[in-house]
Image: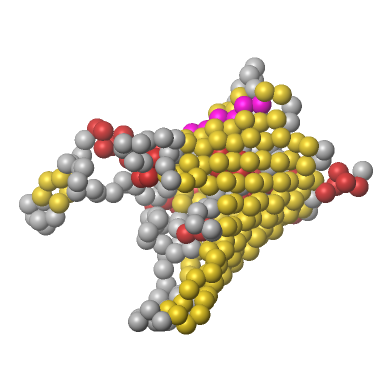
Amino acid sequence: MKRYVLILCLLIPFFVEAQIGGTSTYQFLSLTNSARVSSLGGYTTSIKDGDLNLVYCNPALLDESMDNNIVLNYVNYFAGVNYGYASYAKNAGNLGNFAAGVHYINYGEFVEADETGQILGSFNAADYSINLYWSKSFDSLWSVGAAFKTILSEYERYTSYGNAIDFGITYNNPELFTASVTMRNLGYQFTGYSEGTHEPLPLDIQFGISKKLKHAPLRIIAEVHNLQKPVLSYTNPETDNLTTDPITGEEVKEKSFPNIMDNVGRHMIVGAEITPFDNFYLRLGYNYQRRAEMLISTRKYLVGFSMGVGFRIYKFHLSYGRAQYHLAGATNHFSISANLSEFYK
């Protein structure tokens, strides 16, 4: 069975249409949900250690160790925008593992005005996603999972509704490594913001691998995202070497080894997690695409880098993550989790 699931995951990229930022709706589905994920670069699909927050990235990571776990997350985003994520998990024996989660983002209050600038009032904008997760282990090494998302978006008087599904398969061998293939946000916008319009969702096919060193308190993580879209770079007439296509007359970017390596780098995220002692974690991540797109060449600073810390106090796991998107701003992520069963012992 696991052989057929793996083949299906490998074939999916050839049957889906590539969509990425700027060409799809419900972009909030691609936001980082937790402090740990944020501090490791933005995607974490291949760590299987009982962290319920990681199920948002890959439903195949959900397992029986998360039974009765609850997680709460808050993110201080940009320009007064705030968002959060909460989830709860339950083991159902032979039926597998189940979890439910709510992801929301509040864009705040806006001033409503007509074409002449006359103030008419105010309005709010927000996005919501209610997620249901399921996973099942085939044996001690292989597991699969799926997520079903119900999406609601409200901008002033404009409302949109859609559904999306995630799939994941994970190979976890603690003696060797953990690897995952995931497909996120495959779905459809049933009701568009205007009548008769339907926009694609932010599909993302990812591969991740992690290794926890046996004789050192270190875990290394590597993630490859947007595999369905080979080229993530864009054409910049001011900096790119452009030539004119003799047939179409359009300017095209010359292919060169630096350009190829730049595009490969935009697909990759690397991270590391250090455990200097029990129940205390230091985390660091690097997102090359974020740095390439948001960097100011004269003041590079730490754009694209992220860092964080995690620790346990009493029966609670607390985490903080900070991701530097631009010289002018960074996001702050706060997470708290607990196993409710521990409070009844």
Q: Give the image's coloring scheme.
A: secondary structure
Please state the horizontal and vertical placement of residue 317, each as a whole percent of the image. Answer: 74, 40
Whether residue 138 is visible: no
Q: Main secondary structure of the magenta part?
A: strand
In this rendered view, identify the residue nearer to me: 334 or 87: 334
* On-image quarter of the C terminus: top right
- Please give left or right for residue 305 compared with residue 176 in the image: left
Query: Is 285 placed above or below 55 here?
Result: above
Q: Is residue 271 magenta?
A: yes
Residue shown at the point (67%, 23%) measured from the top left: 276
Q: Is residue 217 above or below residue 308?
A: above
Q: Is residue 291 visible?
A: yes
Q: Is residue 190 left or right of residue 50?
A: left
* Picture residue at 47% right of the left edge, 82% below the top: 120
Name the residue at the top extreme.
Answer: 215
Image position, residue 211 (x, y; %): 58, 28
Q: How many marks?
A: 0
Q: Position of residue 104 (x, y in %)?
A: 60, 61
Residue located at (20% from left, 43% from top): 240
- In the image, what residue occupies the spot 64% across and 55% down? 85
Q: Position of residue 292 (x, y in %)?
A: 35, 41
Q: Nearer the viewer, residue 182 or 117?
A: 117
In the rendered image, residue 56 lying in the magenta stretch gets the answer no
- Against 21, residue 207 (above or below) is above
Q: Residue furthest left?
A: 246
Looking at this view, name the residue that lies furthest to the front: 118
Q: What range is drawn magenta here?
A: 270-275
Q: Tell me where residue 171 sits by quadrant.
A: top right
Judged left or right of residue 70, residue 301 is left
Q: Quadrant of residue 290?
A: top left
